[in-house]
C-alpha cells in the first residue's frame, strides 16, 4: 500500500495535504518549527508521580539513572499540584545533565476501570478528544520550556483488550494524538501496557487508516529490561531509537541518602529537548545556516545571552568546527559562546537532528547515492534521525538525500517529511 501511494504521488495522481506532505498515514510528517531539535536518550530512566526536588535530583546524580519521567498534564494526572515542576526546575535539572521524559495522562480507554476521565466509545468523538488533549499537551510542554522536536508520551493505561469497540476508540484516539502533535512540531510517543494498548498499536502498525506514533514505551513488569523480543511486537516495529520499557513498577531506591518511590525503565527513544542559555564571549553575528557564508540574522555583543538548542558542524572558527543552533533557528559559531568546550561538542547539549518515519523498508548507504554500499536497513516506520540534507542520485521525484546521525545516508523519497521533491525546512544542508 505504501509503495503504491508513492507511485501515485510520483505520477501526479495523488495529492496528500495542502502543504505537499510527503506521506499520509501511517507515516505522517512532523512540522518542525525553525528552532526545533530532537534528543535521543539511551540508558536507564525512572519515573515518579511528583517531580523530585532539585536537592533530590542532585543527590540522585550518583544513581545509574540519567533520565526522569515528568507528568506535564492531563485530566487523569494523579499528582496534580507538581509544585517542583516549573521552567526553573527544568532549566536546573537539564543543566545537571538529566534528560526529561514528558508524560501526559489524558483521556483513557472507554473500558478502563481505574481512571475517572474516559474517552468516548465513538471513534469520531474520541478523535476530537485526542486533538484537544494533544494541543493541551503542547501548551503544557511549551510552558515548561520544552521546545519543538521534543517527544510527548501519551499515557494509555491498561484496559480490556478483548473489547473491539474499546480497541477502535483507542486506536483512533492515538492516531489523532499523533497527527496533532506532528502538526505542532512535536514527536508523538505513547506509553501503553504490553497486553492492551501496545499490542493493539502493533496490530495496526501498517494500517493506512491510522497515523503511527513515532515511539512506544511499554509497561511490562517482568524485570527484563530488554528492548527487543517483546511479545506480539516484532523487532522490526519501532526499530531505530523508538523503544522504551518500564520493567519494574512501584519500588523504593536510595541514592545519595535520598529515597524515592519509582518505576524503573530502559530507554532508547526520543525525549524532551530544551534550550541552554550561555553567554557570548565576543561580538558575534548569528547566521541562517552554520557557516559565515549564510546571510546574517542577528548581532550579539559580548556579554549577551544566546539560547542554544543543539550543536552541529560547520567551517572551523578559531579552535572549533562546532556551531550552535539557537531557538530562533539561526546559528552561531561555538568559538564565541561560553559552552564547556572550545574544541568539540558540549554535553548536555544534544546534536542537532530532525527524525521522521520511513514509509517503507529502506537501505542505509555509505554515501548520498544508489551506487554507494549498503551499510544497513531501516524497516518501515523506523525513525530516520536526519542531521542534514544534500543532493545525490535521483530516486523517484527527488535528488535529496538525508544524512543520519550515524553518518549513513537514505534517499529522501521514502522519508515522511514535508517534501518529495526538494529540501525540507528546517533541516540544514550538508
Image (cartoon, grey):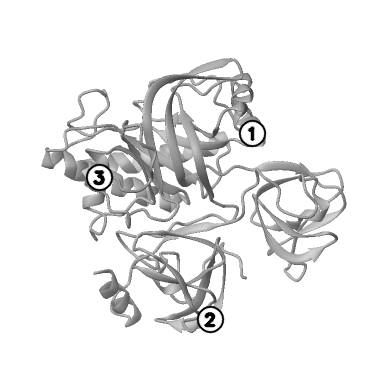
Q: Earlier in the sequence, mark 3 or mark 1?
A: 1
Task: Give the Cα distance between marks 3 and 2.
Answer: 40 Å
Q: Residue 231 carries which label?
A: 3
Q: Residue at x 27, y 24 (%)?
A: 115
Q: Which mark is residue 91?
A: 1
Decide which of 198, 304 is in the foreground and name it: 198
Question: Which SS class for mark 3?
Answer: loop
Q: In this view, does 286 lie to the left or right of 419?
A: right
Asked if 297 appears above or below 15 in the picture, the reply is: above
Horizontal and vertical percent for residue 371?
Answer: 49, 84
Horizontal and vertical percent for residue 61?
Answer: 62, 28
Horizontal and vertical percent for residue 273?
Answer: 56, 44
**Does the CB distance between marks 1 and 2 fall below 8 Å?**
no
Q: What crowding class fits label 3: few (fewer than 14 Cα within 10 Å), some (14-19), or many (20 or more)?
A: few
Question: Which SS class for mark 2?
Answer: strand
Quarter of the picture containing the C terminus is: bottom right
Decide which of 295, 216 is in the foreground and name it: 216
Question: Which SS class for mark 1?
Answer: helix
Q: What crowding class fits label 1: few (fewer than 14 Cα within 10 Å), some (14-19), or many (20 or more)?
A: some
Q: Which of marks 3 and 1 is in front?
A: 3
Task: Give the Cα distance between marks 1 and 2.
Answer: 40 Å
Task: Give the Cα distance between marks 3 and 1.
Answer: 38 Å
Q: Residue at x 32, y 74 (%)?
A: 6
Asked if 407 appears above or below 152 in the picture, the reply is: below
Q: Which of marks 3 and 2 is nearer the N terminus?
A: 3
Horizontal and vertical percent for residue 410?
Answer: 47, 71
Q: Which of marks 1 and 2 is nearer the N terminus?
A: 1
Q: Name the residue under label 2.
A: 392
Amino acid at each position: 500500500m505504501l509503495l503504491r501511494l508513492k507511485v501515485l504521488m510520483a505520477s501526479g495522481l495523488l495529492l496528500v495535504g495542502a502543504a505537499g506532505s510527503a506521506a499520509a498515514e501511517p507515516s505522517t510528517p512532523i512540522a518542525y518549527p525553525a528552532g526545533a531539535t530532537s534528543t535521543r536518550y539511551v540508558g536507564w530512566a525512572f519515573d515518579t508521580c511528583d517531580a523530585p526536588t532539585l536537592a533530590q535530583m542532585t543527590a540522585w546524580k550518583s544513581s545509574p539513572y540519567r533520565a526522569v519521567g515528568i507528568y506535564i498534564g492531563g485530566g487523569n494526572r494523579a499528582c496534580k499540584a507538581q509544585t517542583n515542576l516549573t521552567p526553573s526546575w527544568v532549566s536546573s535539572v537539564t543543566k545537571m545533565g538529566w534528560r526529561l521524559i514528558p508524560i501526559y495522562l489524558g483521556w483513557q480507554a472507554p473500558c478502563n476501570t481505574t481512571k475517572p476521565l474516559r474517552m468516548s466509545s465513538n471513534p469520531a468523538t474520541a478523535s476530537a478528544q485526542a486533538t484537544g488533549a494533544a494541543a493541551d499537551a503542547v501548551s503544557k510542554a511549551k510552558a515548561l520550556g520544552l521546545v519543538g522536536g521534543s517527544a510527548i508520551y501519551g499515557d494509555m493505561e491498561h484496559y480490556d483488550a478483548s473489547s473491539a469497540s474499546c480497541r477502535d476508540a483507542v486506536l483512533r484516539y492515538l492516531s489523532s494524538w499523533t497527527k496533532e502533535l506532528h502538526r505542532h512540531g512535536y514527536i508523538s510517543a505513547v506509553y501503553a501496557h504490553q497486553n492492551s494498548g501496545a499490542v493493539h498499536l502493533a496490530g495496526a502498525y501498517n494500517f493506512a487508516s491510522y497515523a503511527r506514533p513515532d515511539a512506544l514505551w511499554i509497561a511490562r513488569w517482568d524485570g527484563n529490561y530488554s528492548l527487543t523480543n517483546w511479545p506480539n511486537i516484532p523487532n522490526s516495529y519501532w526499530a531505530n531509537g523508538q523503544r522504551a520499557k518500564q520493567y519494574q513498577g512501584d519500588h523504593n531506591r536510595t541514592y545519595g541518602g535520598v529515597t524515592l518511590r519509582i518505576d524503573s525503565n530502559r530507554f532508547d527513544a526520543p525525549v524532551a529537548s530544551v534550550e541552554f542559555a550561555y553567554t557570548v564571549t565576543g561580538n558575534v553575528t548569528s547566521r541562517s545556516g552554520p557557516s559565515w557564508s549564510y546571510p546574517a540574522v542577528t548581532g550579539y555583543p559580548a556579554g549577551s545571552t544566546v539560547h542554544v538548542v543543539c550543536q552541529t558542524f560547520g567551517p572551523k572558527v578559531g579552535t572549533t568546527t562546532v556551531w550552535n543552533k539557537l531557538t530562533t533557528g539561526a546559528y552561531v559559531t561555538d568559538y564565541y559562546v561560553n559552552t564547556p568546550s572550545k574544541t568539540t561538542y558540549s554535553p548536555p547539549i544534544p546534536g542537532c537532528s530532525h527524525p521522521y518515519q520511513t514509509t517503507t523498508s529502506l537501505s542505509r548507504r555509505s554515501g548520498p547515492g544508489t551506487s554507494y554500499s549498503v551499510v544497513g536497513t531501516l524497516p518501515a516506520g523506523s525513525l530516520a534521525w536526519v542531521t542534514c540534507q544534500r543532493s545525490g542520485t535521483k530516486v523517484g521525484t527527488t535528488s535529496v538525500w538525508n544524512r543520519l546521525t550515524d553518518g549513513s545516508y537514505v534517499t529522501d523519497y521514502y522519508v515522511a517529511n514535508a517534501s518529495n521533491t526538494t529540501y525540507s525546512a528546517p533541516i540544514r544542508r550538508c
